Image (cartoon, rainbow, N blue to C red):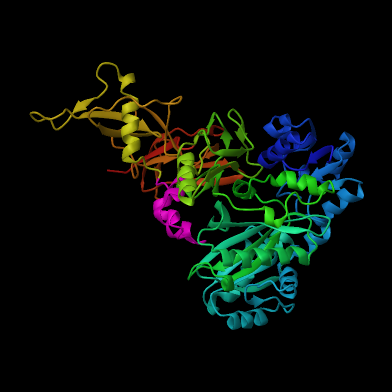
Amino acid sequence: MIASLLIANRGEIARRIIRTARSLGVRTIAVHSDVDAQMPFAREADEAVCIGTAAARDSYLRQDRIIEAARGTGAQAIHPGYGFLSENAEFAEGVVAAGLIWVGAPPSSIRAMGLKDAAKRRMIAAGVPVTPGYLGEDQSPDRLAREADAVGYPVLIKAVAGGGGKGMRRVDDPSAFAEALASCRREAASSFGDDRVLIEKCILSPRHIEVQVFGDTYGNVVHLFERDCSLQRRHQKVIEEAPAPGMDAGTREAVCSAAVKAAQAVDYVGAGTIEFIADASEGLRADRIWFMEMNTRLQVEHPVTEGITGQDLVEWQLRVASGEPLPRRQEELAITGWAMEARLYAENPTTGFLPSTGPLATLRFPEGPRIDSGVEEGGEVTPHYDPMIAKIITWGRSRAEAAACLARACAGVKVWPVRTNAAFLARAAAHPDFIAGRIDTGFIETHADTLVPTGEPSPAVLQAAASAIVPAGGGDPWTALRGLRANAAPSRRIEVEIAHRPYLVDLAPGAVGTRLHNGILFVEGEAWPVGPRRADHVAGGGAGDGAILAPMPGRVIAAVVEQGQKVAKGDRLVVIEAMKMEQALLAPFDGVVAELRATEGEQVSEGAILARIEGEA
């Protein structure tokens, strides 16, 4: 077994690798940027080395500094995790050239699967079914347009070197092809330095099915069954599960065997994932599942495979890299139960999933599920790296049980003041169509109206907020009694402020005080600042009342107007900056700046009132 391991990554995956390495008696070394010096992964490693400043290009992407750190600390091997340099063949070669063990795919395999067109040609030669399309060298717009016509619309234009949903466009009509092609090429050139594209048939009821494969240095390759990653938003995975719903034994055998063939075709060693696209219009069928691409690394969603197989995939990686054969033969692997994973992100679904950064004054997870997280309460979500807070992983004896556990877990998340997608995840996991397995990659878009919170407190939130301030109101917490009649229970109308807006709530009879956490009410994965109504608010305030609220935590970089100034609808009022993005807040209608609270340079929390516009009489 490897004696010492440097982890060329950060956050959640670094902690995950440290956990398994420690159980095997392997000494661990973390590398970190200056802003990550106090992150949990840097503290938990046996040794930590700073390799640069916050920007990834100056730290986590610096191959020379990572290898230098490995040499300086006596590390025997380097594990790249996922992201950053995990699929960089040059880095893998540099690690090996430095006399170190590379815990990852061979550089030749990374290269073979790195370009989509070359990978598909290799798969065709290996007898692996691929999506109908065009992979030719002729990249002229006329030739690509003709090939799209031949494939049949709708089609996908994909960057040859693409990934993560970048450099991809769906085209439904020939008249839109030229513009989509030009846009795709610009994005591909900017993101990957390569503007070449391929054409694929667009599957109208697509399911994203992927198979976990593993190879060793003795030529053995096995699969650890499939995962379904169909719940996506903008081509980014949201909820993953294993096994895939609706997968029968014959189809599973076909797709998993194809995945093993794909891995064998590139002499694969280590953990990898073969990704397939399935036409699910008539359910999952072996003749309607096609190879898309291979990820030559460990995947973010690997815990669901661990959940159904009982295997530690990081341990497998370390054993294979140490020269051992695979820990299990194919016939020794089986599926037990069902596992699901949801990705908890620092983002606000009510503002179009804008990123949310700042301190994690509160970060609490319910008991029961497996939580893989890179941060902790009292820490911070910075704008420098991926905004994932945690992976929430549940297991059940059935799919229904796993989904119910996941919905409860997401609803029980408590995070403040950073905003998260917890309520969105809870709604998705509890949606009747999800529970029934009626899913495809368009699920979230189709059900957006019911999945995305509106930003307005629900009746349950209003009641909970009103009851929460009852004990704080003294002997007479309500301010008015309305609708009294003989023999009827009195209605207690409570004036309460929720998320910086005033509301009048008729408190239900028998309501008791709800517990607040430092002035914050947590309901079904959402966080609501709650308190008694402030005197400077007008009862009934809400949408359309002229209040200008900060859409995310950030810094005020300009207050463009002055109190008392006349403004027209669409005029810029305040400009805030968050995650290196500027956002101008505009006047919602013609009027006067009745109130201006924004101060240049001030840090503001999401939902803070920055200004208020009153319409002219």
* Quadrant of the rendering where the N terminus is positioned: top right
Q: Residue at x 72, y 38 (%)?
A: 20
> Residue 250 location in percent, x, y?
58, 67
Q: Residue furthest top?
A: 475
> Residue 421 location in percent, x, y?
50, 44
Residue 482 placement: quadrant: top left
Judged left or right of residue 150, residue 463 is left
Asked if the stretch drawn in magenta spans residue 411, the answer is no
Asked if 411 appears above or below 509 in the picture, the reply is below
Closer-to-camera residue (545/167): 167
> Residue 320 location in percent, x, y?
80, 49
Closer-to-camera residue (374/138): 374
Asked if 187 appears above or below 341 in the picture, the reply is below
Q: Residue furthest front?
A: 331
Closer-to-camera residue (533/329): 329
* Quadrant of the rendering where the C terminus is positioned: top left
Q: Which residues are magenta?
A: 426-454
Q: Residue at x 28, y 37 (%)?
A: 540
> Residue 138 location in percent, x, y?
73, 79
Judged left or right of residue 282, residue 167 is right
